[in-house]
Structure formats: C-alpha cells, structure tokens
Image (tube, rainbow, N blue to C red):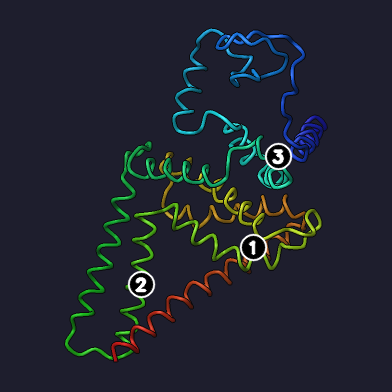
Amino acid sequence: MTNLVEKWKAFREWQQRPSHIPQMTEQHHRCSTCGQEFQGNYCPCCGQSARIGRYSFKNALLLFLDVWGMGNRGMFRTLRDLILRPGYMIRDYISGMQMAYFPPFKLLFLLTALLLIVDSGVNLKGKNYLASYHEQTVNTDKSIAKKDKKKEITSAERWNTITDLYIVKIREFRESSPAFFWLSLLFVFSLPIYIFFWKSPNIPDLRFSELLIALVYIWGMQNIYEIVFTFLGVYGGIGDVVWLLCIIPLKQLSGFKWWRTTLYVLLSYLAALVLLFAAILSVAQIQLYLEA
C-alpha cells in the first residue's frame, strides 16, 4: 500500500512539472548532408538532426508521419500529455512552451479526420457509424417534409417544423464538416466558460485567446477518447459522456477545487445550450414572420 502511495505521489509530481526538453549536447558532429561541423542537436547550416544515423524502421515511421504533419513538434509528447496531464500541458503551452507541443488547431483537424476514418468502418465491429447517422438524418428530413406538405397547418405546427428543419441542418453541417462544426460550437461554449474561468488561482488573468487555445486542446483530448471507444465498438451515446472529461483539464489548468470546476462546467454547458437553441428559435420565428 505504501508503495502505491509513493508511486501516486511521484506521478502527481511528474504531472505538475513542465515537460522536459532534451538539452543541447556538447558533442561535436559533422553533418551528413552539408558537411558542416557543429556542436549541438541540429546543424546550423541545413537544420538536420545530429541524431540521424543509419536508416531504420523508426526513421521510416517518422518520415511517414511527417507527410501528414505528425512527425515533428512533439506529436507523441502532446498525445501522451493530453491523456496523462492535459491541464498542466495546456498551462505549459500558453505560458510559452509552444515548440514543445504539436499546434492545437492542426492537432484537432488531424484527430477529427482520424475519428471520421474510425466512424466510417475502420473499427473492431466493422460498422459504418457515419452511414447510420446519415440515414437517421435523412429519415428525420423526410418526416419534416411530410409535415410541411400538409394542406392545413397551424402557425404552431409550422413553427415546430421550421425549428426541426434548422436542427437537421445543424446535424448535416456536423456530418459534412465536423471540424468546422466543433470549432463553431467551441466559440459558443467559450463565451460562458470564460466568465467562470478568467480569474482562477493558477491563472488570475487568463485571456480569452488563451482560453480558446485551451478548449481546442481539450476538444482534441476528447477526440482521442472517442477514437479509442469507437474503435473498440463502443459508440452509442459515448459523445454525451466524453464531454465530461473536460472537467479534468480545466481543474488542472485553473486550480479550482473539483466541486467548483464541475459546477462551472455544467453551468457553462447549460448556458451554451440555451444560447444555441435561442438562436435556432429566433431564426425560426423570423422565417415564420416573413412567410406570414
């Protein structure tokens, strides 16, 4: 038991320490590309790493990942830290350690693309969740169209039909452009959450731009878990649970107690939903007024 407690304390200390970046080596090297003699990790003339040696499977993997923009700038460190120390990693990034981690927006788009691949059937069940989701959306659209063709329809029914139509359009937007959809939703969510987290014990003067970066990384973290669960075949309703994971990085980032962080997150989501549905209802009401 004592050993477990000591390991937990060591893990907690590691979580809160900034990520270690290898220091510059004092060894002298001769660049294999340009012949420049230098001291350090990279050639000052052409930028080639001093660690490059004979070709290996590791080099091949890194070159393959580099084609997709993932072979540099700490991709593996970013994925590891988003799972084990997300809030502390985000704190390090917005504090200035930007070269140590993979860029947030690029990471979000890459993870979203990978999630689409897994959703399309590259999972243990071999099920195309995108097709099922599309079929559900089409059936909803047909149901709305049938309601809209009724000869006699009240204003309330017409208003409900228009509202359902806009909800379907949002779902279609999510299906066709998931990365842009989540970024749009992120901006809606960022407004109320900034009210609660702009002053915190760890960051007393958090900027709105820094919060946006934090939320992009948090969304990337959620995508990692969704990719894993969907690949394992656990899909139904998982997205409704994964969003609760944002409590962990926000707690680590802000320094608030668990109960306060949880309360602020729940209130922020509630406020974001109210804003989103208020916008939908307002647009539907305007369209109904114009049709009258």
Q: In the image, residue 212 lies at what x, y percent?
A: 61, 56
Residue at 64% across / 8% down in the picture? Answer: 30
Q: Quadrant of the N terminus?
A: top right
Residue at 75% across / 23% down in the picture? Answer: 23
For discs 2 and 3, the disc positioned in front in the rendered view: 3
Residue at 79% across / 33% down in the picture? Answer: 10
Q: Is 38 left, or right, of 31 in this rendering?
A: right
| Residues under numbered marks 1 and 3 in contact, where contact means CB atoms less than 8 Å apart | no
Q: Which of the two labelled residues, at mark 1 and mark 3, occupies the earlier sequence position?
A: 3
* Labelled disc at residue 97: 3
- Characterize the local packing of mark 3: few (<14), some (14-19) or many (20 or more) Cα atoms within 10 angstroms: some
Q: Give the residue at mark 1.
A: 265
Q: Is 242 left, or right, of 16 in this rendering?
A: left
For discs 1 and 3, the disc positioned in front in the rendered view: 3
Give SS at disc 3: loop
The quadrant where residue 267 appears: bottom right
The quadrant where residue 206 appears: bottom right
Give SS at disc 2: helix
- Characterize the local packing of mark 1: few (<14), some (14-19) or many (20 or more) Cα atoms within 10 angstroms: many
Q: Give the residue at mark 2.
A: 166
Q: Which of the two labelled residues, at mark 2 and mark 1, occupies the earlier sequence position?
A: 2
Q: Nearer the viewer, residue 28 or 37?
A: 37
Q: In the image, residue 92 lies at what x, y percent?
A: 72, 43
Q: Amino acid at mark 3?
A: Met
Q: Nearer the viewer, residue 151 or 190?
A: 190
Q: Amino acid at mark 2?
A: Tyr
Q: Amino acid at mark 1?
A: Val
- Characterize the local packing of mark 2: few (<14), some (14-19) or many (20 or more) Cα atoms within 10 angstroms: some
Q: In the image, residue 42 lies at what x, y percent?
A: 65, 19
Give SS at disc 1: helix
